[in-house]
Amino acid sequence: MTPERLDVEDALPRMQALSSRLWTPEARHHPGQLAWSAAYGEPDVLDLGPVFAADDAWAWLESRDWLEVCGTDPASVEAVVAAALEEADDEVHASTLETETAVVQVLGAAGFGEVELPWFTHHLLDLADLPPVSLPEAYAVRAVAPGEHEERAAVHRAAWSATSRVTGTAYRRLMATPPYRPGTDHVVIAPDGAWVASCCVWLDEETGVALVEPVGCVEEHRRLGLATAASVSALTAARELGATQGLVCPRGDDDYPAPARLYQGIGFRPGARTRTWRLSRGSR
Ligand SMILES: CC(C)(COP(=O)(O)OP(=O)(O)OC[C@H]1O[C@@H](n2cnc3c(N)ncnc32)[C@H](O)[C@@H]1OP(=O)(O)O)[C@@H](O)C(=O)NCCC(=O)NCCS
């Protein structure tokens, strides 16, 4: 079995379809996360590497030193990982959920060992249990409208960092990347009209899983419940479109606990965590 080598732009629909088909709470990839990872910045800035795809697995060099893998069939996973390693740097990392046994076994057999790096815990929520949207007086929350990519990118950057790669041009492209929908991308507006918090939710119609990615609130308006309101509002919109389960993947290590607290405050409960693996081959 020789995997096909593809640019991520061409491979994305196929990668998303497989992640959707193989979805369980114990699988790492969601179509919305893949869309975000492939399109959150402008292509020449992200400099994303190739995808190696077989029918039942893919391996993506998100960069030459970072490998993402999807699949449950050991032979298919082995084939795509081997193909990707042909083009990877001598030192390459990979991240998996701890529950992805086929991928973990294949990486181990290829010489990867576990390393201690910041990790993430998948959190899940039955959307029947969503709380109502609650906002401080004079704030409002609404969906982004088509064409508002500049404002939307700006509120993301203001919450994250001025050096964020999320430019207006990048966000316009993201908004054209399925399964993005403006109706599940929500912003909070302050009494003076400024956009101050945001949450994008990605609905996978095949599985009914609505992924929260990303969330932000500008510093001057924090601890008012605005990130919570944006998230609950966007998830409520996803539920109206048929979503049944919410998913979010905040840091799980102790160095950055705020986002996990925020999502647990909404009702999300922790599931499996990520583990990071490294292969160091010296110069070949
Ligand atoms: C994390 C972030 C989104 C929180 O935004 P926010 O509007 O202040 O969040 P909320 O007011 O809705 O907070 C809800 C709960 O989250 C937790 N929380 C939020 N910020 C926290 C912090 N700095 N320290 C500890 N807990 C925090 C608290 O439990 C809080 O409830 P409380 O205020 O009643 O104690 C914001 O700080 C941010 O944009 N940070 C940079 C981007 C980021 O990390 N995004 C999330 C990545 S998954």
Image: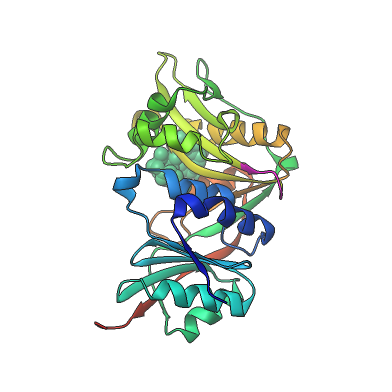
The answer to whether residue 260 is seen in the rendering is no
Residue 186 position in % (x across, y down): 53, 29
Identify the image quadrant of residue 56.
bottom right
Residue at 61 percent of width and 50 percent of height: 247
Q: Is residue 252 above or below residue 37?
A: below
Residue 135 position in % (x across, y down): 55, 24
- Image quadrant of ligand 1? top left
Residue at 66 percent of width and 60 percent of height: 25
Identify the image quadrant of residue 167.
top left
Q: Is residue 245 above or below residue 79?
A: above
**Quadrant of the rendering where the C terminus is positioned:** bottom left
How many discs appear?
Answer: 0
What scheme was used to colour the molecule?
Answer: rainbow
The answer to whether residue 52 is seen in the rendering is yes
Is 242 on the left or on the right of 31, as rendered? right
Q: Please identify the dominant SS of the magenta region.
A: loop
Residue 191 position in % (x across, y down): 44, 14
Residue at 40 percent of width and 54 percent of height: 256
Q: Nearer the viewer, residue 91 or 193?
A: 91
Q: Is residue 184 magenta?
A: no
Q: Is residue 205 magenta?
A: yes
Extreme-left residue of the structure: 283
Residue at 64 percent of width and 52 percent of height: 124
Residue 50 position in % (x across, y down): 41, 61
Is 6 on the left or on the right of 14, as rendered? left
Q: Is residue 226 above or below residue 246?
A: above
Is 117 on the left or on the right of 124, as rendered? left
Q: Nearer the viewer, residue 238 or 14?
A: 14
**Quadrant of the rendering where the N terminus is positioned:** bottom right
Instruction: Write down the region rendered in magenta.
Output: 203-207
